[in-house]
Amino acid sequence: MQKVINVLAITSFAVSAAIVGAGTFVYLNKDSIVDGIKEKAMEAAMGAVTDALPSMLDGAIPELPSVTGGAMPELPTTTGGPIPSGPSMPF
């Protein structure tokens, strides 16, 4: 029975030491870990934007009308009405 308790004690110590060691490692290297995650996130975001941008622009820019036969389309002969004048300045 004493041997089982000793094995459990040694196992418990090893697990506790591993947790303390991992926590110390993460604490001492947290800046580089955060920077690495930020870089990966920015690369992923830039890749998504770069992939989506051409299709977004194609949908946002209207097609120009084509002129066939070299003839120019007719320009309008009338325009809209005059712009009404606003209130005059009191001074």
Image (spheres, rainbow, N blue to C red):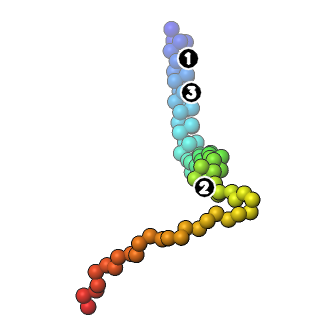
Task: Read off the residue under disc 1.
Answer: 7
* Residue 7 to residue 25: above or below: above
Secondary structure under the numbered disc 3 in the rendered image: helix
Task: Read off the residue under disc 3.
Answer: 14
Give the x, y percent position of residue 21. 57, 37
Compared across the picture, whether 82 is left or right of 34 comes to left
Quarter of the image where the C terminus is located: bottom left
Marker count (numbered): 3
Q: In this rendered view, identify the residue nearer to me: 62 or 81.
A: 81
Q: Earlier in the sequence, mark 1 or mark 2?
A: 1
Task: Read off the residue under disc 2.
Answer: 61
Secondary structure under the numbered disc 2 in the rendered image: loop
Q: In this rendered view, identify the residue nearer to me: 26 or 35.
A: 35
Which amino acid lies under the numbered mark 3 shown in the image of this protein?
Ala
Give neighbour class at mark 1: few <14, some 14-19, many 20+ (Cα, 10 Å). few
Secondary structure under the numbered disc 1 in the rendered image: helix
Q: Can residue 29 be seen from the camera position used here?
A: no
Residue found 64% across the figure and 57% down from its top: 64
Q: Earlier in the sequence, mark 3 or mark 1?
A: 1
Q: Can residue 15 be seen from the camera position used here?
A: yes
Residue found 56% across the figure and 42% down from its top: 26
Residues at marks 1 and 2, CA–CA distance in whole angstroms: 72 Å
Compared across the picture, whether 41 is left or right of 66 comes to left
Which amino acid lies under the numbered mark 1 shown in the image of this protein?
Val
Residues at marks 2 and 3, CA–CA distance in whole angstroms: 64 Å
